[in-house]
Image (cartoon, grey):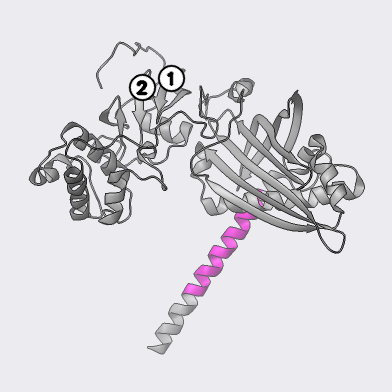
Amino acid sequence: MTTTEHQRAVKAAADELIDVSFTVNGTPVTIRVPARMHLADALRQHLGLTGTHLGCEHGVCGMCTVLVDGDAARACLVFAVQAEGTDVVTVEGLGTQDDQHPLQQAFSHHHALQCGFCTPGFLMSSYDLLTHEPGVDDERLPEELSGVICRCTGYRGILAAVADVAEAHPEGVPAPRNCAPRTLVGRGGAATAAAPEAAPVGDAEEAVPTDITRPTGTPTITVEVTRLLTSPLDDIWAVMTDVHRLARCLPGAEMTEDLGDDRYRGRATVALGPVRLAFRGLARITERDESLHRLALLAQGADTGGNRTAADIGLRATATPDGGTELRADAAVFLSGRIAQFGRALAGDVSQRMFEQFAHALDETARTGQPPDVGAGPGALSIGVAAVRDAVRRRLAAVRTTLQERRARRRGC
């Protein structure tokens, strides 16, 4: 990548943290990274853009290909600090599941993948090729795409897909379809993410969002929980509209400041398995409908390790014939940073358990009039550990079942 006038000379120690500002998929971001961290790790670890895959990390396999100022670049060969002032597009910016780019549609149509590990690199390299050489001949495609290695030998489908798009768009491939300013788990505006190993605890406030906007894109996980509560509807609704008591019902959450206009500052502990993360952030009530007994809110937070979370939460209470209450909670949860690399199943299980515990605490608060003490009851860490334990048990049970089926087939033979 050549030096341009918007880049600055950087002289820093290997372990020194440097603020780098650039645009990724249409969103301006600022991240704090070690001087020698390459762009691929910065995208994955600090911005949660894990579609950029890492293979050889020597610039050979092409898995980490992204666009930097419109040109293909190996993200493992570019230092993150070199991205200062640039416009970066990753495979996430190419299109969405509901609005796929023609290249993504063609790859799907021709089944131009097997394991899919090389697919992001091929998509971005193909986009670069068809942007700069829209009239490329089919005969040249194998050579032009040779910079990305497919370990599953799916080249025929890949070549067919790229050839189709080249034929359908002789004047040039359409622009990426998912590049626009947005709030993606707190990354909109000037998102700040500190380095995981070196960020001091005193810098925690720097990661706290200063504003909150409804997240866009595809949520990491969705949660739907319906629980029957013993308390009457009016008592449940009274707790739902008392934000101080409501916040105390969510495991690991605590409200620290009322900012007015239905905006609140707080902190929360989130655990995925044995990993415990402390977030600071904002919450805003977006709907309070007394006739429907419905409450909706947005929550958004960050920690000093570059992890970010946001949730669009809806709560609705309905009276039951026996005088109790049916509580329905649904949430779209967005995760980025290292926390986003946990399996969706585990993250979903932890979120489900937290909402179930929330429903129990809400019922108890409505019954007794007193919210749980901070730290009382199952915390986020114990809930996360329980989820991992159950996941391991399910996995072991599945393995035992498979082994039993194999033994039965051998005996049948």
Of 413 and 139, the residue lying toward us: 139
Question: Where are the magenta residues, as a range?
Answer: 384-402
Q: Residue placed farthest to the front in the image?
A: 291
Q: Position of residue 16 (x, y in %)?
A: 46, 18
Crowding at dot 2, Cα within 10 Å, few <14 / some 14-19 / many 20+, comes out as: many
User: How many numbered marks does the figure carry?
Assistant: 2
Left or right of residue 190: residue 75: left
Looking at the picture, which amino acid does disc 2 mark? Ala
Q: Say whether marks 2 and 1 touch (CB < 8 Å).
A: yes
Q: Is residue 132 magenta?
A: no
Query: Magenta stretch: residue 389 in it?
Result: yes
At 27% from the left and 35% from the top, the residue drawn is 58
Residue at the far right: name it.
368
Image-quadrant location for residue 310 = top right
**Can you tell which mark lies on residue 183?**
none
Q: Quadrant of residue 4?
A: top left
Residue 153 pos. (x, y %) = 21, 55
Q: Is residue 78 above or below residue 112?
A: above
Q: Is residue 375 visible?
A: no
**Residue matched to label 1:** 20
Return the residue at label 2: 83
N-term mark: 2 or 1: 1
Give the left or right position of residue 258, taking residue 34 as reference.
Answer: right
Q: Position of residue 302 (x, y in %)?
A: 59, 31
Crowd rating for badge 1 (residues with CA inside 10 Å; few <14, some 14–19, many 20+): some
> At 58% from the left edge and 50% from the top edge, which residue is drawn?
222
The quarter of the rendered structure image containing the N terminus is: top left
What amino acid is at disc 1?
Val
Q: Main secondary structure of the magenta part?
A: helix
For the residue labelled by badge 1, is the local secondary structure a helix, a strand or a loop?
strand
Distance between the Cα atoms at labels 2 and 1? 7 Å
